Amino acid sequence: MSIPSTPSTPSPVQYSPVRQSESLANIGAALSKAQASVKVAVKESTNPHLKTRYADLLSIWEACRAALTEQQLSVVQLPVSDEPGYVALETMLLHASGEYISARCRVRLTRDDPQGAGSGLTYLRRYALSAALGIVADEDDDAQSASTPPPPAPRLLSVDAARRLSSQLDALLPGTPQAELSHVDYAAQITGRSVHELTGLTTREAGEVYAAAKAGKRAGQAA
């Protein structure tokens, strides 16, 4: 059986026959209920070689941890010895009744050193756990992220535009209740956020500040 490779991990992954307890009645019922509560794993990590996103081990555990605990299920994953150049993992799904299902898988290393072994084990842990519990990754969110361009960054005021706005406020604020405010404090009041200098405003916010000052001036003249 072949599984798409991820960073530092080749395929194929090789599996051994499944081992199990004599009875699977309790673990089967518990697993059925747990799978009804298992969440979709979120693709939050990026494969730098293939430029694709995938669900890492943390995302997969977050998708199933609560469901397993609620149904008295636990997972044990242990590295086991294998021939040189390979790393192997034993994954066992246990129930409080003592019933279990277990299988072993291995993968060939791309780097025959501790870092390569660690990468291979992490790869096996997430794929074995996903396979045992029927966990799937969030394809829809991944496709949406890939096809939707990010929104453009807001455009900030230039120094010249900030000076023009300052001159406009000098003309509009006198005679209004905000006359004692500095231009920066007035802009903060209108935008509802902290403003340290007028060049920190977006062009949209600057327009709102000017419009508010102009409306305040007209209201003062009408009164």
Image: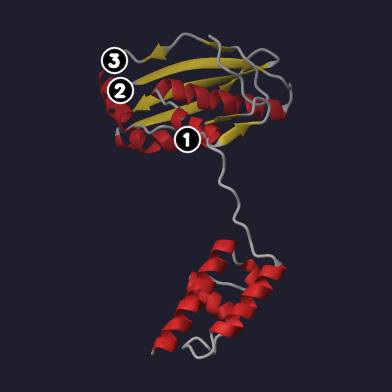
Rendered image: mark on residue 42 = 1
Q: Which residue is mark 2?
A: 27
Mark sitting earlier along the chain (1/3)? 3
Distance from disc 3 to disc 2, alpha carbons, whole Å, reads: 9 Å
Does the rendering let one see residue 56? no
In this picture, residue 136 sits left or right of residue 181: left
Mark 3 vs mark 2: give the one in front.
2
Element under disc 3: loop
- Which residue is pictured at 62% across the width and 57% down the height? 155
Amino acid type of the residue tagged 1 in the rendering: Val
Numbered-mark total:
3
- Which residue is pictured at 50% across the width and 86% down the height? 178
Element under disc 1: loop
Element under disc 2: helix
Amino acid type of the residue tagged 2 in the rendering: Ile
Distance from disc 2 to disc 1, alpha carbons, whole Å, reads: 26 Å
Q: Is residue 94 above or below residue 162?
A: above
Where does residue 118 sit, x and y in percent of width and height?
65, 29
For this rendering, which residue is in front, 81 or 47?
47
Q: Is residue 201 above or below residue 60?
A: below
In this picture, residue 113 sits left or right of residue 25: right
Rendered image: mark on residue 23 = 3
- Which residue is pictured at 55% across the width and 21% down the height? 89
Where does residue 106 sit, x and y in percent of width and height?
58, 16
Where does residue 136 sit, x and y in percent of width and height?
43, 26
Q: Quadrant of residue 67?
A: top left
- Which residue is pictured at 55% across the width and 75% down the height? 187
